[in-house]
Amino acid sequence: MSRLLVASALLVLSIPAFAGSFAGSSAGASSAGSSASSGSSSGDDKVVLQARDDAASFVASEGRIRGARLEAALRHLRERDADAREASDMALAQAILAL
Amino acid sequence: MNPGRPNPRRAGAGFRAAAALALLAGASGAAWASPRLQWDDQGLTEAEASATRELVRTAEARLTPAMRKHLARGIPLRWSTTLDDRVHGRARRDGVLLLNRRLLAGLLTSGDTRTHAGTAAEAALLHELAHLLDRDAPGGSMSRDPRLRDLAGWQVRATPGLTALMGRTRGNHFRERSPDRYELRNPREYVAVNLEHFLLDADYACRRPALHRYFAQRWGVPPIAPARCPADLAYVDAGAAMATGGRLGTLDPERIYQIDYLLAEGNDAMMSRWGHSMLRLVICAPGRPRGPDCRLDLEHHRVLSFRAFVGDVQISGWRGLTGRYPSRLFVLPLDQVIDEYTKVELRGLRSLPLRLERDEVAALVERAAQLHWSYDGRYFFLGNNCAVETYKLLRDGVPRLASAKLGGITPNGLARRLERAGIADGGVLADPARALREGYRFDSMRERFQTLFEVARARAGLPQRRVEDWLDAPPQQRRSWLARTDLKSAAALLVLEEAARRQQQLRVRDTFKRRYLQAGGQGGELGEAAGTLRTLLRETAWMSRPADLLAGTGYGLPQADERALLESGSALRRGQLRDLEQRLDHQIRALLDPAQARDLDAVDANIEWLGAHLRDLHRQAGGLQLNP
């Protein structure tokens, strides 16, 4: 499914660009926005995908901008993954960005 | 007074019948303190006299002991032939109860009242007895009690001073999912109608829990066997993302760690200069024990927000000023609210935890659910805006807060007063970095733009000096600079490119919206897209009025049957919405002028290119690979 221009019906009517959509799954055309909109992403993915803006800001600012969504994603990854527990915040933020 | 209702909607009749039978067996023992309803058998046939006796006996058995004691006196009762057909009964000032004689005929044809729990005659008799209870209730008349009026929906005004000056609002806007619209006539009838249901309906405690507690505290629990209430509260999610939008959600007070006052900071637009007041429910992820860790379960948090519509297409500033648009309570995913404000409107959010006891959290959420299903208010820019609505929700949900001086008309003012009263914890913002990290503040993306742009400018040698100039440059021109980026500058430009796309989308939408409104909602140059949008608006109306989804079934908070109904229709509704969205999207795309379409595609391409570039850089650097 191609990304909707008006990411949701309600978008036309209002505001919400829920597409925090970074291009870039392996399929190329899909995005955080469209996978969320198809309802196919699990809750797990969502925490990480929602953090991509925060992760990008964190990486670019060398850690100065550190938002709650990144914090939530870091905790989530470390709860789930042993490798993530060993990794630094910056390494994880970069990994989120490269998803 | 008690008018006839052509179609009395009462749930739980089966329960009631069983309970009434159970109760009659043991009722005679309470005769020592009972109302003595006195009527004259003269003019009644044998059957009518017997039906009257049975009616009185059954109705009395429904009263609580405290009610029976309070009414333990002679009460004259008459079958009246002079009452209007539509009127079932009247409690006269002199204490005489009149019941419409037509009800007697109904009693005879329907046979034994015991097998017809809650016949019209019984409801009418209880209704009139309720008026007597209300008139000289111990502790004062219920219908004059400010707390009862809070619960019922004759609400206070924006400030205590205004309420003192002008009295409470005259109308009652809790008009959706009413058991009987007659209750909205005035507080006296509200009390009588509700006591009727309190005594007759097994699930009154589930449908109107706060009122049930209020009456039970005054009069004790009615003899009817209570239904078991679900522990959670149902709502219709107004989220824009199809993952949640239109879905039937539930709020379980046990899973709510805290409630925050959520303030969207103001911007220059007239309607939002003062910011926006909301409440944030800090809901714990499934399986996580209730505690501070829940603060980061952002995807489970929900926001209670008073809005006019789910979208804003119908809104103009003037309408808000003159009070011609509605005020309704929406339940939205926090993630969406963060995006709306920080990314689209470029406004920051502040989230101040409220110091509430556990039972207060539960009562506040319960009140919110009642508003969600029943409230159809009117928005007034000064008199009844989001701050006033949120203030009323807080004080009506948590009576303790009614004594704090919270009233006011601005969202900022409400935040200040909540802090001053020691209810909101403003200390969470003391350390800005920590506030951002822990989600007490969500910064506007605008605050990040310049910082990120500086990073990219220094590292990739961008020609522009200001981020606005970068974003205004044609996307094809920006593309030529992307190749020069390293990890940090690519990350920075990705955030900015996303922002550029949102700006573009907003422009497209605004143009479309303007053309749609100019065409008066007719097709014209917009062709089929106008029709699709019209359908979409109609089809999403239920998001603002969830009660419409249950037209005619039940009252108050939806129970098991109604929930099943909502559940079964949900997939269909959401599927239809998705189809309409996609159709509209295609139609709008076709309306774009070629340059606009080219720019949109170019930004998409830039974002994709940056995504691939970041993955390459990450791989080359041997970075950690996540497998989501």
Image: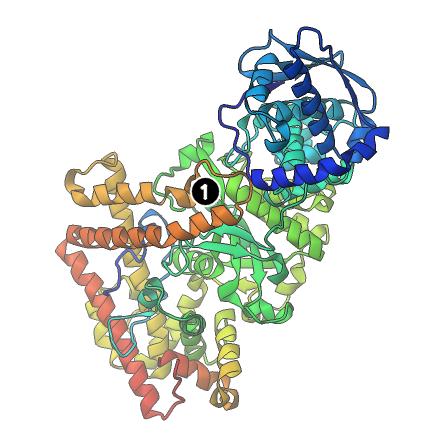
User: Which amino acid lies under the numbered mark 1 shown in the image of this protein?
Assistant: Met
At 33% across and 44% down in the image, what residue appears? B539
Image-quadrant location for residue B603: bottom left
- The answer to which of A84 and B195 lies nearer the viewer is B195
- Given the current orientation, which residue lies at the most extreme right position? B32
Quarter containing the C terminus of chain B: bottom left
Q: Is residue B3 visible?
A: no
At 51% across and 73% down in the image, what residue appears? A72
Image-quadrant location for residue B30: top right
Q: Is residue B236 visible?
A: yes
At 23% across and 50% down in the image, what residue appears? B584
Q: Position of residue B602 (x, y in %)?
A: 20, 67
Q: Position of residue B306 (x, y in %)?
A: 50, 45
| Residue B177 vertical placement versus A78 (above, below) | above
- The answer to which of B305 and B116 lies nearer the viewer is B116
Q: Position of residue B396 (x, y in %)?
A: 65, 41
Q: Which residue is mark 1?
A: B271
Image-quadrant location for residue A28: bottom left
